[in-house]
Amino acid sequence: MSEMPVKITRALISVSDKTGVVDLARALAARGVELLSTGGTAKALRDAGLNVKDVSEHTGFPEMMDGRVKTLHPKVHGGLLALRDHPEHAAAMRDHDIAPIDVVVVNLYPFEATVAKGAGRDEIIENIDIGGPSMVRSAAKNHGFVAILTDPADYGEFIAALDASDGATDLALRKRLAAKAFAATAAYDSAISSWFAFADQGATFPDTLTLAMTRGDELRYGENPHQKAAFYAPRGPHASGIGQARQVQGKELSYNNLNDADGALELIAEFGDAGPSVAIIKHANPCGVATGASLAEAYGAALACDPVSAFGGIIAVNRPLDAAAAEAITGIFTEVVVAPGADDAALAIFAKKKNLRLLLTALPDPARGGLALRTIAGGYLLQSRDNGSIAESDLKIVTARQPSPQELADMLFAWRVAKHVKSNAIVYAKDGATAGIGAGQMSRLDSARIAAWKARDAAETAGWAQPKTVGSAVASDAFFPFADGLLAAADAGATAVIQPGGSIRDDEVIAAANEKGLAMAFTGMRHFRH
């Protein structure tokens, strides 16, 4: 492999994305570089007044089959793959009149964009590039002598490198470009593989799962300062979310900020069809959720659930922020606020809190499909998203007493929240607001007790006569395995219960509910969240 600078004498340019290509070609031509090109790229360069040689003239072989066969030729790949300092390779080039090609400028057919626009299958197949990836891989493999450009963002750096080296490239630059080129073809093949597996073949879990992601920001650190972290976004069509949010102000986002903000956004998306709603998240768990006549009112009710935990929390709302909501939210220290929009008055109020991060993004569809991926030691776990939901018509009332309309509303409200609470999850709700939340305990009984304890603390802090769990509905993310958790909820004042059912002791639990005069509904669906 040559570590010497390689003088650029001949370049092959064939691009789908023509951004910046004329300026690059003009810079090469000014240095006496021969330009080889194909089809639409050649036309664009000629229209710019540049002298271009068609690849078909270079190879002595015409383009055919609607352009499917044009660069797949020994005079192209021999010129790319030949080791210039290898005697046998040099002899083969002389014997077969193969001229060296020193730089390749290629970006590939727009396969992902074609899929994204909803094209038919035939058009999608035609946008699978064959010649382009072949040239990219040939040039990248032989980076000891050949430079490969696959990204218009690199054109300026490349021209500057030529200026600094009298029209030559050095090995460090060629190695860097080769690494990027192989990543580009790997991502391209991944997109094609994924389309065939999921869209074309309808597989849920293909034999081979390929993932292609593009790095966004490198983060200050991971969950802890000794861990490194970065954000990656999937390539190709995908649902938007917290990763695509626009940061309006505030400090850079941390790993934990993004993780908690994602949880807040996913939770508040459940209330996209409700009135103004607010969710407050702390350490990936909700500590208060409420719906009200306005965002400010909803925030006040959400905060009242657990004002201690809300300090330094993450807030998500389901309506554009106004001045009243901004004033309320900035009343205590908040790390991140996520909203679908904000008016000028709200932006001005938030601007006074320089470190507060304000993120604007559309609410995702909670019913959307997709897959969730998690790492474990030695592998990955893949599952479909938990996009399950329950309507009033899905409920099976299993107690003697039927729930009142308000109890039904609070049951369904608590159920929506419980889906986003770490298991074991217990959520008390009353009048469209959480009254107490117990999360992530090894015992469902402990979750019920912790939620009630937090509700009592909140009542004492606010000076209420009794905690809001009195007269509330309680949701459990999975069935009560024993009656003890349900009895703890009844002791806290709950009058209605919503849970999946399905325990071998359901009869015992139903009997306990009847004895306490509770109304209870089974959903037939659980929402474990680990």
Image (cartoon, rainbow, N blue to C red):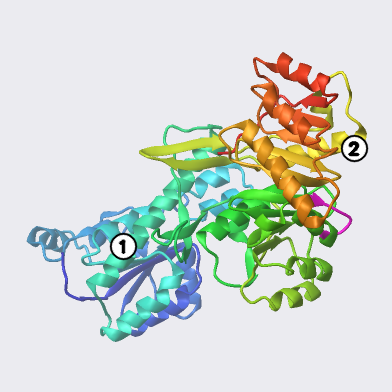
Q: Earlier in the sequence, mark 1 or mark 2?
A: 1
Looking at the image, which is closer to me, 311 or 335? 311
Label 1 packing within 10 angstroms: few (<14), some (14-19), many (20+): many
Nearer the observer, 131 or 505: 505
Q: What is the secondary structure assignment of the residue under circle 2?
A: helix
Which residue appears farthest toward the right when viewing the image? 405
**Which picture quadrant has residue 29?**
bottom left
Residue sitting at x 48%, y 75%: 20
**Viewer-side residue, 180 vs 472:** 472
Instruction: Assess whether residue 280 is covered by the magenta stretch.
Output: no
Q: From the viewer's perspective, tell me whether residue 18 is left or right of residue 35.
A: right
Q: Amino acid at mark 2?
A: Gln
Q: Quadrant of the N terminus?
A: bottom left
Quadrant of the frame with the C terminus: top right
Residue 435 lies, in percent from the top left, at: 77, 45
Image marks 1 and 2: residues in contact by CB distance under 8 Å: no
Dot 2 corresponds to which residue? Answer: 406
- Residue closest to the eye, 424 or 93: 424
Give the residue number, with chain letter if any, for mark 1: 178
In this view, 350 is above or below 363:
below
Q: Amino acid at mark 1?
A: Ala
> Is there any visible trace of residue 183 in the rendered image?
yes
Secondary element at image label 1: helix
Residue shown at the point (77%, 47%) measured from the top left: 271
* 295 is higher (above) or lower (below) than 402: below
* Above-or-below relation of 419 to 69: above
- Marks 1, 2: nearer the viewer: 2
Q: Position of residue 440 (x, y in %)?
A: 58, 40
Residue 201 relative to residue 130: left or right: right
Q: Position of residue 38 (x, y in %)?
A: 42, 63
Q: Which residues are magenta?
A: 290-295
